[in-house]
Image: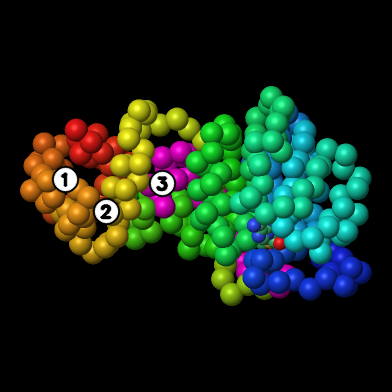
């Protein structure tokens, strides 16, 4: 196991909060995260933010190939040295939001997976960017802030169920894997973390749907959590026919008039979208 304190001292590295640099120091947690990804030698794993490579090394022991994309060029010497015994790792010094991921993984015919202890400042944009690409990821494993993990994996009629829960379900089957104490990091963050596993799937109910309208509906529906759907979605000026039409659509679909967004499943949102697209 890489000793984080020793590596930071050896290379004179200062971790920066702005890049979300909280490094995992617990090898058991690292192994558990990699196990959650069910990594095998036929897999290519994209790791976002390898830091100084502690988790990368564990992934590299099991995967066929690892592509590790790290934004911070100051970490490059330590990262390269720590991973030099693994010829199956390729280190890329880039911002993941700007990287050409398709090109980075080009030619790999086996399963493609993502494993990352995500930088907290940019969690949602990275997750949505990865889900929205047409790359057929098999499994995506993310460590994120605990509250965010709860929202990602939330089911209807719970307090954490929100627009992001529906968005994630559009592309994948999300599961909360386990929680991680803040004491497992250097420096110690202000919050606890949790690991979520997203298994990509092709959901029947959203096939051939107007995707743009679907996400507009979901976003507007959750824009005022306490309001009924009639008042949140129904008051949008882009909604043709407004509240009256929405009321009729709800009746037609057998959904109660006083329903709130948090009570609707992804199947309900899909049915709503199909009706409102007519
Ligand atoms: N993987 C290491 C670990 O688990 O100990 C470090 C995880 S740390 C929470 C997040 C890492 O993501 C940092 O190394 C940070 O420099 C890197 N990072 C931040 N923003 C990034 C971006 N836009 N693209 C790629 N890497 C990024």
Where does label 3 land, which residue? 167
Magenta residues span 164-187
Q: Nearer the viewer, mark 1 or mark 3?
A: 1
Q: Earlier in the sequence, mark 1 or mark 3?
A: 3
Residue beneath disc 2: 221
Q: Quadrant of residue 162?
A: bottom left
Q: Position of residue 70 (x, y in %)?
A: 73, 54
Q: Residue at x 91, y 54 (%)?
A: 81
Q: Residue 209 versus residue 167: which sits nearer the camera?
A: 209
Q: Is residue 165 magenta?
A: yes
Task: Tell me the colour scheme of the image.
Answer: rainbow
Q: How far is the residue under mark 2 from the one under mark 1?
A: 15 Å
Give residue 240's mark. Answer: 1
Which residue is at 19% across, 54% downward? Answer: 237
Q: Marks 1 and 3, how far apart in space?
A: 23 Å
Which residue is depicted at the point 23% across and 64% down?
Answer: 226
CB atoms of marks 1 and 3 within 8 Å: no
Q: How far across and how far down the image is residue 178, in percent?
A: 57, 54
- Looking at the image, residue 53 sits to the left or right of residue 180; the answer is right
| Depth check, front residue: 11 or 268 | 11
Q: Nearer the viewer, residue 199 or 128?
A: 128
Question: Which of marks 3 and 2 precedes in the sequence?
Answer: 3
> Would residue 244 be seen by someone viewing this image from the given angle?
yes
The residue drawn where x is 61% and y is 51% is 97
In whole angstroms, how far apart are the C-alphas of marks 2 and 3?
Answer: 13 Å
């Amino acid at each position: 196991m890489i000793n984080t304190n020793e590596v930071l001292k050896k290379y004179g590295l200062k971790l920066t909060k702005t890049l979300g640099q909280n490094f995992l120091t617990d090898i058991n947690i690292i192994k558990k995260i990699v196990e959650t990804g069910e990594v095998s030698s036929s897999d290519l794993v994209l790791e976002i933010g390898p830091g100084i490579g502690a988790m990368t090394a564990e992934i590299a022991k099991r995967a066929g190939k690892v592509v590790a994309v790290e934004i911070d060029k100051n970490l490059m010497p330590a990262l390269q040295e720590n991973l030099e015994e693994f010829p199956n790792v390729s280190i890329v010094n880039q911002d993941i939001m700007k990287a050409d991921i398709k090109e980075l993984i080009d030619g790999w015919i086996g399963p493609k997976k993502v494993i990352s202890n995500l930088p907290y400042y940019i969690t949602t944009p990275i997750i949505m960017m990865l889900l929205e690409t047409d790359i057929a990821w098999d499994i995506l494993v993310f460590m994120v802030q605990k509250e965010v993990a709860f929202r990602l994996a939330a089911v209807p009629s719970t307090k954490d169920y929100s627009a992001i829960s529906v968005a994630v379900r559009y592309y994948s089957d999300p599961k909360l894997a386990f929680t991680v104490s803040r004491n497992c990091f250097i420096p110690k963050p202000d919050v606890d973390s949790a690991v979520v596993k997203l298994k990509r799937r092709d959901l029947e109910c959203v096939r051939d749907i107007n995707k743009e309208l679907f996400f507009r509906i979901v976003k507007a529906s959750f824009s005022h959590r306490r309001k009924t759907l009639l008042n949140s979605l129904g008051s949008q000026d882009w909604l043709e026919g407004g509240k009256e039409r929405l009321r009729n659509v709800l009746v037609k679909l057998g959904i109660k008039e006083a329903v709130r967004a948090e009570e609707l499943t992804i199947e309900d949102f899909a049915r709503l979208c199909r009706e409102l697209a007519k």
